[in-house]
């Protein structure tokens, strides 16, 4: 046998073979383009949503730097910035925080930022410039200027009062530039030169590393080579420079933060088996969807051209050369189909992405044009094409010339003819026809099954989004009214100035329709508990501070007669209505409803899923605890015990000792968690709950931290409108939260998922239907002569159409049955989604399968009829004379 070894001739032969199969080429190009459209549109939507989420996350996080090293000295900055992993850095130094009117509802920081830090924190002036060193200039956003009543003009003067580590100062600045206020950011900035920072510190007599480790120290934002392993890279930088972040009380401790806004970092840092499995399943489904339609085209094409390949082998063409011909054809077809698919797919994705993101509040409207979309889609499409033509290529390469001449669809080596004693049946013939090419049948059914499974998955997850779980986690009553700072991130420590006045509560109750309400009293006086040193240290181990600060704190902390360390206790006073909102972990709250009761509940923290952290408190059920209510403190020398009186010395070397106080003993009757809408909003001290009457009596204070209440469903909207007007116009010091606002937020999340899942289901469903159409079309075209023979021996056109309809029905029924089976098989996996989404509750449903069943059955009848009419326009004689190629 003479082997053809000329590659140029083989390539030419492949091109000529393509030219003889124009219909196949068109179908293949459409299939490849459609697959590329699927990949590109999905990548565009996913990356656009990812970019939108990241952009929103960055604004909420305060910037887009990869990470931040905190509370640094200049020497530490100089060491860290030289590390090879630090590609760029930006510096920031906080001077103070204005908290009084008009900034009670806005978190504002007066700070120095270099150009990089300003850019990365969205604080670069769009008009004017950053302040220059050695001047009284400052730059800020339009929100701060509006609150100050200053017209945005370069050169305008404005005066600002703010606290520098607890010391108030008033400073006047000249506006050098400004930018538009962004409501999504957690803070507004007044940026000043570092020379002004130093001058103010000197003016107020403040030395950095005071009681607030943030004021006066340096923060260094860094950009790393990539965002995939931020936490690991930050730790590696510290190790390179001789620092550590594990032991705050140890030597060379440096604290750092990771920008949680980068989704890639979140994914890699929190990868677990369930997440990996879900990612793999999604990728397999995407690849499989494209594989199914393209594979079917090449498999049927090879079956139709099998005689041609057999003839090639008789003249010496090797199996490898035949495979190369098919790969060449696939590549040429891809060169046409993939570019078309990339363009169409991006246009489809760019239209769907904004619609998807519009359903979710707070997500930036961004249409991604990342090269990853086009490179990834093209690579996926090309991989799918070559995977799809691999098996047909092997079939063409293995066929012998004799087998090729005798080949008909569904024939195969070792296939035996079976005699049937059953009578003639159109359904039986249709079922037998599906069995003639099991591979094509399986592929077609599987592509339809994917559409069934994906739609059912979308509906299942959407139904699983639990509004009650979501809202109840955010707010436990219909409304909560409090000072505006109570709802701010990093808001003010509770004090009498931010208490809710009684007239505000009276105004709410005057609206009527309040079905229940209760006050939460907050602690404003000094209350101490005494705890073991090990617990005292463990509770503060994660706090930042200079080397040895924890040892120094322990040495300066007062001890009682038993050697226990004094620690601040955080108390709640709750009325009956608010006590009803607590989650009881152990014990019984009934004793707390009794006026004057000396019962107390210990407050434990919980995670996003409501799971309590049982190591978050030392008190246990039945314990007897003593709280010390301090009326007056005195300050003593920690070494000699000499008293400084009630005024602490300036050098800071003193120990606080209760001078006048009362000790009250309580019994722990319950362990509880407090809903986030009723708590202080900050942590750091052990918390306890008292009856409101006992709280006011023992603490000597009656400051209301918040007022929570329910209304009738009919009056809910009216109360929402009243509170909005009241907190904006009548009492702007106050603010509120409601179930309605969180329900609207939840609806946005649900709407986004439904639109995204629906679009994905539609694309995959379209691929499945087109694959179904392609299978029916190519099957009928390949059997035109066979149908003509059947008609020539007496089979009527009506019978032939009936047989084809039965084939379509069997395809549809198989897809529905297999889809339902896969849905049931995936039920355990879907149940695990509850561990990933705290507001998800799984409910098994087969309703989407039931809805798709009649649609698929209708398509199973209509598509074969339409294709048959198109394929049988020629006369019976012409079809009998036709060859099968």
Image (tube, helix red, strand yellow):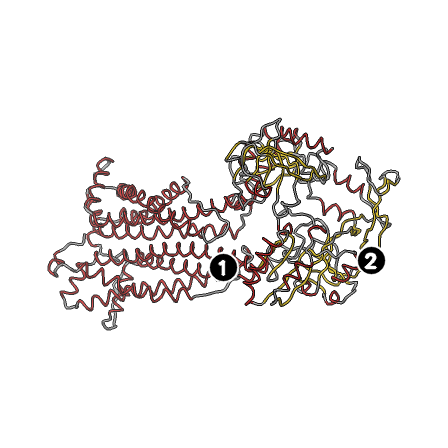
Q: Which mark is residue 830?
A: 1
Mark 2 neighbour density, 10 Å: few (under 14) some (14–19) many (20 or more): few
Report whether 723 appears left or right of 316.
right
Report whether 105 appears left or right of 463.
right
Question: Helix, strand or loop at disc 1?
Answer: helix
Height in image: 854 above or below 119? below
Q: Residue 339's x, y, as percent?
A: 31, 42
Image quarter for residue 510? Answer: bottom right
Residue 368 visible here: yes
**Going from the N terminus, do you reach mark 2 or mark 1 first?**
2
Give the labeled residue for mark 2.
Answer: 664
- Foreground of the two, 505 or 325: 505
Q: Which mark is residue 716?
A: none
Instruction: Write the residue at 81% across / 53% down.
Output: 629
Q: Residue 357's x, y, as percent?
A: 45, 50
Q: Residue 6's x, y, as percent?
A: 23, 35
Question: Helix, strand or loop at disc 2?
Answer: strand
Image quarter for residue 162? Answer: top right
Quarter in which the N terminus is drawn:
top left
Report whether 509 appears left or right of 364.
right
- Foreground of the two, 324 or 278: 278
- Foreground of the two, 168 or 345: 168
């Amino acid at each position: 046998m003479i082997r053809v070894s000329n590659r140029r001739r083989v390539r030419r032969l492949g091109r000529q073979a393509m030219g003889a199969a124009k219909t196949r080429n068109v179908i293949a190009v459409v299939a490849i383009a459609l697959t590329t459209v699927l990949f590109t549109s999905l990548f565009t939507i996913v990356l656009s949503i990812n970019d939108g989420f990241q952009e929103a996350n960055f604004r909420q996080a305060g910037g887009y730097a990869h990470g931040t090293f905190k509370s640094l000295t200049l020497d530490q900055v100089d060491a860290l910035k030289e590390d090879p992993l630090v590609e760029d850095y930006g510096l920031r130094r906080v001077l103070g925080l204005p908290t009084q009117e008009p900034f009670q509802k806005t978190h504002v920081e007066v700070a120095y930022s270099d150009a990089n830090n300003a850019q990365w924190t969205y604080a670069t002036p769009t008009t004017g410039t950053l302040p220059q060193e050695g001047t009284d200039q400052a730059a800020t956003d339009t929100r701060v200027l509006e609150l100050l009543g200053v017209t945005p003009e370069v050169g305008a003067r404005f005066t600002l009062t703010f606290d520098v580590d607890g010391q108030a100062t008033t400073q006047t600045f000249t506006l050098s530039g400004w930018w538009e206020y962004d409501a999504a950011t957690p803070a507004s900035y007044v940026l000043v030169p570092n020379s002004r920072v130093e001058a103010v510190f000197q003016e107020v007599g403040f030395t950095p590393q005071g009681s607030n480790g943030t004021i006066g120290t340096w923060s260094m934002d860094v950009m790393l080579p990539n965002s995939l392993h931020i936490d690991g890279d930050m730790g590696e930088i510290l190790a390179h420079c001789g620092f550590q972040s594990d032991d705050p009380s140890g030597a060379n401790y440096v604290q750092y933060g990771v920008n949680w806004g980068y989704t890639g970092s979140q994914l890699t840092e929190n990868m677990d088996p369930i997440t990996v499995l879900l990612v793999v399943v999604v990728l397999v489904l995407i690849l499989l969807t494209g594989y199914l339609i393209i594979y079917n085209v090449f498999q049927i094409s090879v079956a139709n051209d099998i005689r041609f390949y057999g003839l090639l082998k008789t003249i010496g063409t090797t199996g490898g050369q035949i495979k190369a011909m098919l790969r060449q054809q696939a590549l040429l077809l891809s060169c046409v189909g993939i570019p078309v698919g990339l363009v169409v797919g991006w246009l489809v994705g760019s239209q769907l992405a904004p619609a998807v993101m519009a359903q979710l509040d707070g997500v930036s409207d961004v249409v991604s044009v990342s090269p990853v979309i086009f490179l990834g889609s093209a690579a996926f499409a090309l991989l799918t094409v070559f995977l799809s033509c691999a098996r047909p290529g092997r079939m063409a390469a293995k066929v012998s010339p004799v087998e090729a001449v005798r080949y008909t669809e569904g024939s195969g080596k070792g296939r035996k003819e079976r005699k049937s004693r059953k009578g003639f049946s159109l359904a039986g013939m249709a079922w037998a026809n599906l069995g003639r090419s099991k591979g094509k049948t399986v592929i077609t059914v599987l592509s339809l099954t994917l559409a069934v499974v994906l739609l059912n998955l979308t509906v299942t997850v959407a139904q699983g989004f639990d509004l009650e779980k979501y809202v109840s986690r955010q707010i436990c009553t219909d409304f909560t009214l409090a000072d505006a700072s109570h709802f701010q991130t990093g808001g003010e420590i509770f004090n009498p100035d931010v208490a809710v006045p009684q007239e505000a509560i009276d105004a709410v109750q005057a609206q009527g329709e309040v079905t229940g309400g209760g006050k939460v009293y907050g602690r404003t006086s000094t209350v101490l508990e005494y705890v073991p040193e090990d617990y005292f240290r463990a509770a503060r181990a994660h706090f930042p501070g200079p080397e040895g600060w924890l040892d120094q704190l322990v040495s300066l902390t007062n001890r009682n007669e038993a050697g226990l360390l004094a620690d601040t206790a955080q108390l709640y006073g709750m009325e009956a209505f608010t006590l009803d909102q607590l989650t009881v972990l152990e014990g019984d709250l009934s004793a707390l409803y009794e006026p004057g009761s000396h019962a107390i509940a210990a407050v434990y923290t919980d995670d996003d899923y409501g799971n309590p952290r049982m190591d978050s408190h030392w008190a246990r059920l039945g314990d007897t605890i003593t709280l010390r209510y301090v009326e007056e403190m005195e300050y003593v020398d920690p070494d000699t015990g000499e008293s400084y009186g009630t005024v602490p010395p300036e050098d800071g070397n003193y120990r606080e000792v209760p001078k006048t106080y009362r000790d009250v003993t309580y019994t722990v009757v319950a362990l509880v968690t407090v809903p986030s809408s009723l708590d202080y909003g900050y942590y750091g001290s052990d918390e306890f709950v008292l009856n409101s009457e006992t709280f006011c009596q023992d603490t000597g204070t009656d400051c209301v931290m918040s007022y929570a209440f329910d209304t009738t469903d009919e009056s809910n909207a009216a109360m929402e409108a009243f509170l909005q007007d009241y907190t904006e116009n009548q009492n702007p010091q106050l603010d509120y939260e409601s179930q309605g606002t969180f329900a609207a937020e939840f609806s946005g999340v649900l709407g986004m998922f439904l639109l995204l899942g629906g679009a994905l289901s539609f694309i995959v469903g379209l691929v499945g239907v087109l694959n179904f159409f392609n299978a029916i079309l190519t099957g009928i075209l390949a059997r035109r002569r066979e149908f003509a023979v059947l008609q020539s021996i007496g089979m009527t056109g009506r019978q032939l159409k009936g047989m084809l309809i039965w084939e379509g029905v069997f395809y549809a029924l198989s897809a529905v049955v297999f889809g339902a089976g896969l849905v049931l098989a995936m039920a355990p996996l879907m149940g695990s989604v509850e561990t990933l989404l705290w507001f998800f509750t799984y409910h098994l449903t087969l309703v989407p399968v039931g809805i798709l069943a009649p649609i698929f059955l209708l398509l199973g009848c209509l598509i074969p009829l339409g294709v048959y009419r198109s394929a049988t326009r020629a006369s019976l004689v012409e079809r009998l004379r036709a060859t099968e190629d």
